[in-house]
Amino acid sequence: MKISASVGVSSFRRFNVLIFTLAAILLAPVIPASAAKKIILDTDPGTDDALALMLALNSPELDVRAITVVPGNVTAAMGLDNATRMVSLANRCDIPIAAGAQHPLFQKLITAEFWHGKNGLANIELPASKCKVDGRFGPDLIIELIHASPHDITLVPVGPLTNIALAVEKDPSIVPLVKEVILMGGSISGGNVNAASEANIYNDPEAAQIVFQAGWPLTMVGLEVGNKALFTHKYLDVLGRTHGPIIVFIFSIAKYLVDLSATFGAPGSPMYDPSAVAVAIDSTLVKTQEMHVDVETRGEFTQGETVGNRQNMVERNVLHGDRYVIEGVDKVKANAKVCLDVDADRFLQLFVARIEGK
């Protein structure tokens, strides 16, 4: 893999790199450590989780208080190993890394080596980790940290919502103490595992329904964002001109994803999991609409679908003899800000700039 710039790079490519460099300078923040947003990243470390994790660790706007691991893209054990290796690569062994649930609440685990490689990280073998696994159970660690910093913790789940649901079920008192939840999952415009459902929600719909109905401020960063924010060769070329172990790793992951997407005729790879981290950094990257969202847990063709009520109202049907009569409409309370659009180029420039350390 060639990482350094070629001497014979075209004028167009030089201009492109100049534009990205200027954009990175403009995007570079000056954030006091005390002002950084405290987050807990809950993740099922596959390829796009790797991008999300490294974006979080390289963004001064965020203070990663813990990383909890959930099964999804890979098994819980493989995910934990991947997380510790990546955090070690980033020299951030100060961050607690905890194992969580070993399987979804009620259904069998569905892993995605087809998309993420046999080890979940595009078959890239990272060095053994220098970091130790925290002995606490992931949901317990979430509960503990929320109580330690009430109204100050943002949960950023980028995998199935099993750990978050278990924390809520064990200690519902954390709900009003959480600053906000910014999750990657769901869709109101069709799925990516089938016609209706997005993978993270599909992998544990019962957990997702618990999280959506908990009553805390929640932003759903779904397929509408990732499908518009495509990591293409344009961004890959820029990232490939910088050195460093983290950049080489992320370049390799991104290239794997771009090449994989190309086999399906796509011009780039959807940036699913990093999108939730990006929204945690800068909520102005997306446009949202407040909706009441429910998760379908029983449908034959729609299990795992996030059903967004755009009007936030339902008809009131009253039984009269042998039929129901519509007698009016009832309002339903919005429980989520659903992301409908994204400034894709600004998001992708932010990602590249942070990974480059700018």
Image (cartoon, rainbow, N blue to C red):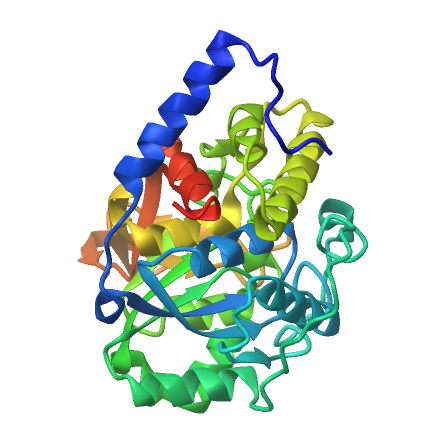
- Residues 148 and 198: in front is 148
Task: Give the residue drawn at x 43%, y 48%.
Answer: 357
Task: Give the residue drawn at x 61%, y 12%.
Answer: 8
- Residues 86 and 245: in front is 245
Q: Position of residue 112 (x, y in %)?
A: 73, 53
Task: Give the residue drawn at x 27%, y 45%.
Answer: 288
Is 356 placed left or right of 133 in the picture?
left
Q: Position of residue 142 (x, y in %)?
A: 44, 82
Is 86 placed left or right of 31 in the picture?
right
- Residues 338 and 38: in front is 38
| Quadrant position of the N terminus in the picture | top right
Residue positioned most to the top? 11
Q: Position of residue 320 (x, y in %)?
A: 29, 60
Task: Give the residue drawn at x 50%, y 83%.
Answer: 139
Residue 69, quarter of the rendered image: bottom right
| Quadrant position of the C terminus in the picture | top left
The correct choice, above or below, for 114 with respect to 94 in the image is above
Is 219 placed left or right of 250 in the picture?
left
Q: Position of residue 154 (x, y in %)?
A: 33, 69
Residue 332, quarter of the rendered image: bottom left
Observer able to see residue 221: no
Observer able to see residue 15: yes
Residue positioned most to the right? 118
The correct choice, above or below, for 59 with respect to 161 in the image is above
The correct choice, above or below, for 349 with respect to 79 in the image is above
The correct choice, above or below, for 188 with respect to 163 in the image is above
Q: How many marks?
A: 0
